[in-house]
Amino acid sequence: MNSRYMVSLDNHTYITQFVFSNFSDVRELCYLLFAIVLLMFLTSLTGNTLIGIVIQSTPALHTPMYFFLLNLSFLEIGYTCSVVPKMLQSLVSENREISRLGCATQMFFFALFGISECCLLAAMAFDRYVAICTPLRYATRMSWSVCTQLAGVSWSIGALVALGQTNYIFSLNFCGPTKINHLFCDILPVIALACGDTSHNQMAVYAVAFLFIASPFLLIIASYGFILADVLAMSSPEGQRKALSTCSSHLIVVTLFYGSGSITYLRPKASHSPILDKLLALFYTVVTSMLNPIIYSLRNKEVKAALQKTLGKITCSVQGGCFTDPTVVTGWFRTSGAQRVGHGENRLPDN
């Protein structure tokens, strides 16, 4: 244990810095992984940024479903940016140190974006439930104020839980060792470095995980249970197909997000290994964030069309100017009753 990472205060050892473990002793493998992670990271940033620009600049997409998708894109950007830059440095640099404050900050933002995403995915499932099961009341039940409240609650829960968890964990006594056997400051690898019995702390972490991660998942399952029952009651096969297709992108994203997280955190301890844990961490921090904009753009005709139009405008402006239709009205949810049917707050988007 390196003494330069420690100071003594009131006869107690105080850890001032942590150091991440090396991914592999084979330098070529680390450089290869660095290139792959960097490529996925840039793809994720580009894809989620484009989704945000497309939704914000396309009035036809100013509906509740795409409002939540815009928030999801912001969360994915924050989620990856909170851990990947330091992860990339640790893969190729001998300097894999992180200060105690830096580790706490990284843990806070990682938990904030992760828990907020759990809650937001539940809000998106509720949006699909209202759109399919009560379409005539969709415009009033999913108004602008309701959507902003759902998004605000998702972000607020993430911030409060992340603040509480981070403060709780870093109030523990860390007296050594200082090496985090992971690629970033995740909760359980950091708790493993605390001195004394941490079983109560781990139980508290699992309790929070159940309340704010498993509970949103159960709400998602319940929403889709009602949706499935309603779809099976439809007499039109075309209506059934369209109702199910409008949920497909969200279901794939939920499966990726919760599937990778469950494999990572709910596996038996006997099956844990440092290399496997690190590979899984790469998957749920980088791969899922990279795939989400691809899933929504490839499986959604409205997003695809808007993306092509936006890219065309960018190309046109670079080449010397574009024509802008002065009749287009911007603004979120500022559509008349006739427009709602066409671009609609209660229309099922084509996928």
Image (spheres, rainbow, N blue to C red):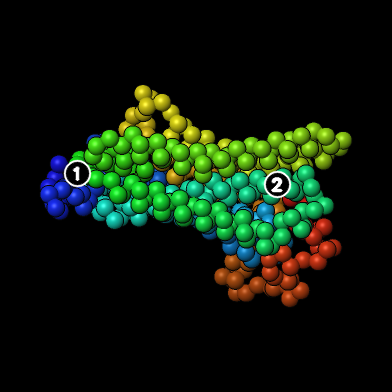
Circle 1 crowding by C-alpha within 10 Å: few under 14, some 14–19, many from 20: some
- Name which residue lies at 19% across and 42% down: 176
Residue 61: give x, y in percent of width and height.
69, 59
Task: Kindly identify which residue carries mark 2.
Answer: 128
Q: Nearer the viewer, residue 94 or 191?
A: 191
Does dot 1 land on a helix, a strand or a loop?
loop
Q: Amino acid at mark 1?
A: Cys
- Quarter of the view holding residue 146: bottom right
Give residue 175's mark: 1
Residue 209: give x, y in percent of width and height.
47, 40
Query: In terms of sequence position, does the residue under pointer 1 or pointer 2 come before the other?
Result: 2
- Name which residue lies at 67% across and 53% down: 65
Q: Report whether residue 263 is seen.
A: yes
Q: Is residue 46 above or below residue 255?
A: below
Q: Is residue 57 above or below residue 141?
A: below
Residue 131: give x, y in percent of width and height.
75, 49
Q: Nearer the viewer, residue 136 or 341?
A: 136
Q: Is residue 164 above or below residue 214?
A: below
Circle 2 crowding by C-alpha within 10 Å: few under 14, some 14–19, many from 20: many
- Quarter of the view holding residue 278: top left
Q: Is residue 327 left or right of residue 190?
A: right
User: What is the CA distance from the residue labelled 1 to the residue labelled 2?
Assistant: 49 Å
Q: Is residue 58 left or right of residue 344?
A: left
Q: Report whether residue 42 is seen.
A: no
Give residue 16's mark: none
State the quadrant of the N terminus.
Answer: top left
Q: Nearer the viewer, residue 78 or 290?
A: 78
- Name which residue lies at 76% across and 42% down: 243
Q: Amino acid at mark 2?
A: Arg
Q: Nearer the viewer, mark 1 or mark 2?
A: 1
Does dot 2 land on a helix, a strand or a loop?
helix
